[in-house]
Amino acid sequence: MKITNTTGKYDNQVYVKEMTENKRLDQRETQAAEKKQETAKGDTVSLSTASKDLQTAKAAAESAPEIRAEKVEELRTAIKEGTYEVNPDKIADKMVGSIISDIV
């Protein structure tokens, strides 16, 4: 009795074809992943000088005390002793300057 495997050759061809297609898909996925990594590595951020100055000023303001204790104590003492003088010209200048800076 002779047994011939007529479907074996066909099965091998289908298997080889499927493996080839799977390999191509794997290569495409690998290339896409590599391209994505290259893009992620190339992203950079640079801050302008004005932005850096703003950050520095913000840090300085945050680290400074909100109330200057020495100045407050000087004013209290001057008021208690009656030596504190209000300068109306100075107050008017600051008020006008504030209004002008708000307009501009």
Image: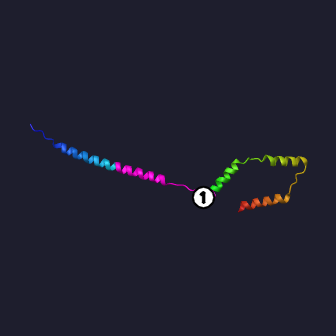
How many numbered circles are shown? 1
Q: Assess disc 1: are there few (<14), some (14-19) or many (≥20) residues with their C-alpha within 10 Å of its C-alpha.
A: few
Say which residue label 1 marks. 48
**Residue at screen point 34% across, 49% down:** 25
From the viewer's perspective, tell me whether residue 100 is left or right of residue 24.
Answer: right
Q: Is residue 10 left or right of residue 48?
A: left
Q: Is residue 86 left or right of residue 44?
A: right
Spot the residue most to the top.
1
Q: Is residue 30 left or right of residue 60?
A: left
Helix, strand or loop at mark 1: loop
What secondary structure characterizes most of the magenta part? helix
Q: Which residues are magenta?
A: 26-51
Q: Position of residue 78 (x, y in %)?
A: 87, 49
Residue 73 vertical placement versus 52 (above, below) = above
Residue at the extreme right of the image, as rendered: 82
* Residue 28 among those drawn in magenta: yes
Q: How is the image coloured?
A: rainbow
Residue 104 appears in which quarter of the rendering?
bottom right
What residue do we see at 84% from left, 60% from top?
Answer: 89
Q: Quadrant of the N terminus?
A: top left
Residue 8: image location, x then y, percent: 19, 42
Q: Residue at x 65, y 56 (%)?
A: 53
Nearest to the observer: residue 91 or residue 74: 74
Which residue is found at the position 69% from the left and 51% from the top?
60
The kind of residue tagged 1 is: Ser
- Measuring from the top left, give residue 91's x and y in whole percent: 82, 57
